[in-house]
Every structure is written in C-alpha cells, then in structure tokens.
Image (spheres, rainbow, N blue to C red):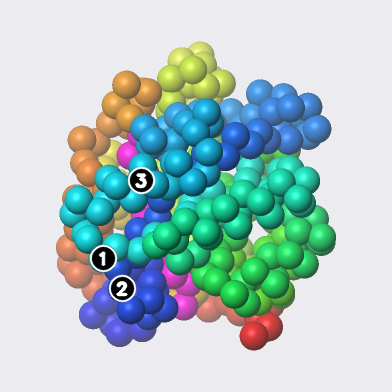
Amino acid sequence: MERQARYHDFSRFLAGRFPFKVQKLSVNAGFTCPNRDGTTGFGGCTYCNNQTFNPAYCRTEKGVREQLEEGKHFFARKYADMRYLAYFQAYTNTYAGLDRLQRMYEEALSVDGVVGLVIGTRPDCMPEALLDYLERLARQTFLLVEYGIESTSDATLARINRGHDFACTQDAVCRTAGRGILTGGHVILGLPGEGREELIRQAADVSRLPLTTLKMHQLQLIRGTRMAHEYAAHPASFRLYTAEEYIDLVIDYVEHLRPDLVLERFVSQSPKELLLAPDWGLKNHEFTAKVHRRMEQRDAWQGKHYTDKPILSFIKN
C-alpha cells in the first residue's frame, strides 16, 4: 500500500479485480435470523433494525431478479456501463436450506450485468455443506462472504444479545477463508463498555483473523430498538461521540489494523426518521473526506502501529 493512500480502500480493491465500475445492489430475500426466531434467541441484537439499511426497492414481496432490475435502473441513469454485485444484506442470508440458497444466489447471478455476490451473514450460520457449495461458486464468480463480528469481547456480545461468542466468529472466518473464499467482517465502534483502549485491543484481534475486507461504523441509536430503550433509562452507560471525536477514534483503530485489510467504510448513515443519536448531519462521502484530511494532519496510515501476525497466514488458491 502506498503511504499517500493512507489506507487500503475498497474502491481500489474492486478496481484491481474488475475492468469496469462496480456497484453493490442490496437484496432483501426474505430471510429471518436465528437470534429472532428462537433457534438462538428472541428479539435479535439490541441495536438492530434492518430498516436502517434497506433501500426502497428492497421489498420481500418482490423477487430477487425484480429487486436487482429496479436497482440497476436507478444506477444506470448515472453510469451506463455499470456492473453490479448482488448484496444479500438484510438479516441472515445463509439461514435457509441449501436448495433455497442456491436458487436465490444463482437467480441473482443470472441477471444481466451482475458480476458477483456479497453475502451478509452471522458466524453461527455457516454449515460445511454450504461452504462446499460456496467454495465451488467462488471459483466461477466474484464472491465475498461478510460476517457480522460487531465486537471481539464476549462480555459485549452477551450485553447486546448477539447470540454467539468470539470463538464462533474465529471459527467461521477461518473455515471460510480456508476454502479460498473472500471473507469480510463488520464491527461497530462505540458499543456500551468499549472505549478507546478496548477498541485498540479489538483492532489487534480483528487483524489476526484471515479477513480480506472490514467494515466499521459508529454506534447508532435507532428508534424502537432495545438499545434505544436502554439509553433512555441509563444514558450515562453510553458514550456517544461527536463527529470529530469519532474521526480520531477511527484513525486510532486503523493505525492498529493489519496493513493489507481492505477497509470498505468507516461510518453508516441511518434514515433520519429512525435515527435518535448521534446525528452528525454528514453524508458518508463527506465523513470519509474528513478522515482523509485528519489522517494527513496526523501523518497517520493504516498499520502504523500494527505488530501482530494473523491467526491464519495462508488462504487456498
């Protein structure tokens, strides 16, 4: 990674794999979650409201193909030669029988202009039979499996009712990457009880995993969630960052990450009508520009303070 780049970003990662511009299109395939239907627990994670990241065209009454075609129509107005990654995003997108999953994934890949898949899921929902199929699929097309890690602290995972521990995450990530499948992770910075020191340790834990990509975003309090009720009852137990404070926290975190991790995003933007706090009034690209400027001011770069070695030092070709 060039020092001027400051960090290993997702757009350059995609540009190195595709000779054309690529955009992710979200798909809501109607899955549920084992942490909601009673298999693992009820109610889901305390912070979760899936409406915060479903575009208007993602409605379960529409099929996979229809959702993708509507998404293509939206982006084609700006970029006529755009290609697409079908992003199975809402809830747990490996939580079904293998036959149903194959039909949905392959329906997405059959849509004109779709050049790969991104599959969002939980670490406790990746059986070996599905990995067998995904390993074969990854030899034929671009495939990224993205796990919700959220935290590496078992105490935090229990507090947010995640329904699994960090050992489960380590196992799923290593099994997936070990099959030669591109593997991503997602973390939330600023969960209750996790300050800067805890998050620096988390950066080291995440860096030891054989991840290709990493997403991070700030803790957001969303209307109707259990975490929002917890905040109303005990606000002192939460640390809500200003935009400038969070920028410095992100940079501290990134400086302790493995240099070759591809960083997809630093922040998330929930719909205004659902967001309680923090409301920074910044679009994602505006926030990212601020991170760039602050990294330059601090002479910061990804991996500046990284010292660890990964748990799994190889990935099968």
- The answer to whether the residue labelled 1 contacts the one labelled 2, judged by CB atoms less than 8 Å apart, is yes
Secondary structure beneath disc 3? helix
Q: Amino acid at mark 2?
A: Phe
Q: Amino acid at mark 1?
A: Asp
- Part of the protein shown in magenta: 260-270
Percent of width and height locating residue 267: 35, 48
Q: Residue at x 39, y 47 (%)?
A: 69
Task: Give the alpha-carbon distance from disc 3 to disc 2, as whole Å.
Answer: 18 Å
Residue, disc 3: 71
Percent of width and height locating residue 121: 62, 49
Q: Residue at x 70, y 71 (%)?
A: 135
Q: Residue at x 44, y 36 (%)?
A: 58
Task: Give the alpha-carbon distance from disc 1 to disc 3, as whole Å.
Answer: 14 Å
Q: Residue at x 42, y 60 (%)?
A: 112
216 magenta-colored: no
Percent of width and height locating residue 13: 39, 74
Task: Give the alpha-carbon distance from disc 1 to disc 2, as whole Å.
Answer: 8 Å
Q: Amino acid at mark 3?
A: Gly
Q: Which mark is residue 81?
A: 1
In the image: residue 179, left or right of residue 139: right
Residue, disc 2: 20
